[in-house]
Image: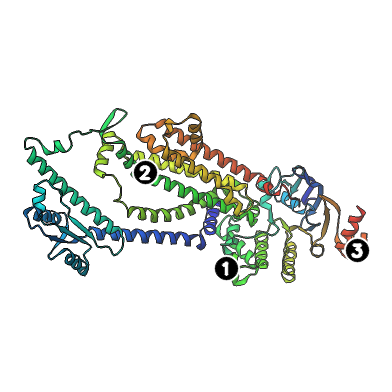
Amino acid sequence: MSVIGNILKKEVKELLTRQLLIPFITIMVVFLFIGRAVRGEKEKAKSPQKVLVADFDRSQLSQDIIKTFQLSGLLVIEASGDEASVLNQAKKEGIALAIIIPEGLAQNLSDLKPVEIKVYNLLKGMSVARVIRSVKLKTILAAINKNLTLQHLKKAYPQVLPENLLSPLRAQEYVVIKERKALGSPELLEGLLTAQTFMIPIILLITIIYVSQMIAASIGQEKENKTLETLLTVPIKRVQIVVGKMLGAVVVAIIIAGIFLFAFSYYIGSFGEFGSVDRQVGSNLTEELGIGIKLKSVLLITLSLFLAILSALALATLLAIFAEDAKSAQAAITPLMILCLIPYFFTMLFDIEQVSLLIRVIVYLIPFSYPFLTPKALIFGNYPLIVFGFIYMALFSIVTIVIAARLFNSDRIFTAKLQFRRR
Amino acid sequence: MNFALEVNELVRDYGALRALDGISFNIAENEIFGLIGPNGSGKTTTLRIIATLLKPTQGEAMVFGSSVTKNPDAVRKMISYLPEDAGAYKNLSGIDYLRFMATFYATNNNERETIVERGMNIADLKERIYDKVKTYSKGMTRKLLLARALMIKPKLAILDEPTSGLDVANSLEIRERIKTFAREGTTVLLSSHNMLEVEFLSDRVALIKNGKIIESGEPEALKRKYNGRNLEEVFMKVEKSN
């Protein structure tokens, strides 16, 4: 077995312990459980919903409204009797929605008087399915309302298209990027891009945190247990020790981050429908603007992520060298976490092109900024920034690894601790 | 005469502090040489320089003719170092730890397994060798580490306080193993603040204090010279005369 392979195998065995895995598997199970429960609720919401409808008007219009309910996927059960008995029937039959269509509905609407349809939500508790069903009913009622308005307008102004009266001033909004324009709004575009790239900072942060912790724990434990002293006296190149340890940390971090991200994305995916932009409209918009996520974009973002993680690994290795034990090694990597959070919040709140030169330089100096900057740079065709980021992160990693290997090769790895002691 | 180890005027500073102040001594092949001195006298620093972990501020040490500063890779092929109070990888089993270390010295799997077999015999942990190191007592861990240090049959074994913190029974066992192994052709440099232990083990000793060797020689000769019943009395008398 190669030297690096031997060290890597040992690192994985040492780091990937039951004590480390159990909390993550627990988190995974919790996320999967919640995700599954939410998905189950959503499936429940999709199934035909029973609605108890009491039609006290018995007009053509009230019957048309009931037919609209049915066509919209509601399972209508007609009820009779007074309002109280309708509610009692709903309770008895376990129906969560009861609608009362009042007497005189058709007449009042014909006289252009407002009419109130009563909607009773019989709650036994709050749930995702409950909320979805309520929203669905409101959407149906809004559509009926709009239809009635258009009919009123048509009757009052037969020569005019009712839509023209309803929306006399319409905004035709375009988004222009470089030479290309498309129908759409910046909010729509922002929402779409956020939906496409929201996992990037999560992947980056989680992986960097775990990679850094693993390498810090590895070096800290070796120093604490004096196993590093033994390892450094065996006839192997010290750079092989550094590389072996780094690879071990990467393997363990990928396993841990993978478990976490799988569970987390399943959990987030269960809320997929909420607040997301219209996929078809969004797709048309990005296609027309030529900024859709294509294979090239995916590869560039992935490369950016990889180089940022490599930079973090190299920096964590360097910082952990100065620690005396496992605890101080964990503390030593705190600056790295802060360096990772700065670009995360910064790129979320500001446009890099619009800020002062000093702040821009600070952001550009942090190697972990580039995965956050790359998606926007791809949209606006800022390829020099992307290429600069790649070169900068690669150089940062190489220089940091070389410094770390040199420190391993010198006696500084011990002297930080030995400086004030005399043996 | 060809020496296994030649140490010439070693000086080591930690900032303003001089930990070693011109230490010189030689060890012949197959000899057991003991460095005796109180805590903080410079024993561990000396051993760490010879083990290629620290660089001397001045001076030189040669292991079988190879310089620890100019050719540390060659030195590392000939030595085995047992640090004081060292641990092993807690989540590996004893045998996995031996196998992990043996892999660095073996050129093929057969050779590796031969080394591991030897390590198992030295450690003599029976079935417990298959248990994780974190379940071992201090004595068992020390036996495992000594086995790790000796199983590769180093030309020079550097043992820092080999029985530190162990009870009498475990200390005796470890001393016996060191002696047996030295007879089989390994030169041993050991340090201890336990002067009786060094007296029992060593062919020759050096007494070290404040980074300087204040006396050296065979234990019996030193006892005669200073009219001491043991090396502890010798050390006290030498210390007074300095």
Horizontal relation, residue B169 to residue B208: left or right: left
The correct choice, above or below, for B180 with respect to A245 in the image is below
Few, some or many residues within 10 Å of mark 3 (<14, 14–19, 20+): some
Residue B79, quarter of the rendered image: bottom right
Q: Position of residue A8 (x, y in %)?
A: 53, 53
Few, some or many residues within 10 Å of mark 2 (<14, 14–19, 20+): some
Q: Chain of mark 1?
A: B
| Identity of the residue drawn at 9% across and 57% down | A57
Discs 2, 1 touching: Cβ within 8 Å: no
- Give amino acid for label 3: Gly
Q: Nearer the viewer, mark 3 or mark 2?
A: 2
The correct choice, above or below, for B153 with respect to A239 in the image is below
Q: Position of residue B163 (x, y in %)?
A: 73, 64
Horizontal relation, residue B45 to residue A169: left or right: right
Q: Which mark is residue A277?
A: none
Q: Which mark is residue B228?
A: 3
In 3D space, how far apart are the residues under numbered discs 1 and 3 (Cα atoms)? 46 Å
Tally of numbered tags: 3
Q: Nearer the viewer, mark 2 or mark 1?
A: 2
Discs 1, 3 touching: Cβ within 8 Å: no
The reply to whether residue A237 is in sight is: no
Few, some or many residues within 10 Å of mark 1 (<14, 14–19, 20+): some
In 3D space, how far apart are the residues under numbered discs 2 and 1 (Cα atoms)? 47 Å
In 3D space, how far apart are the residues under numbered discs 3 and 2 (Cα atoms)? 80 Å
Q: Position of residue A157 (x, y in %)?
A: 8, 37
Asked if badge 3 and badge 2 are on a common chain, one would say no
**Residue underneath mark 2:** A197
Nearer to us in this view, A327 or A73: A73
Nearer to us in this view, B98 or A11: A11
Nearer to us in this view, B20 or A231: B20
Q: Which mark is residue B131?
A: 1
Horizontal relation, residue A68 to residue A404: left or right: left
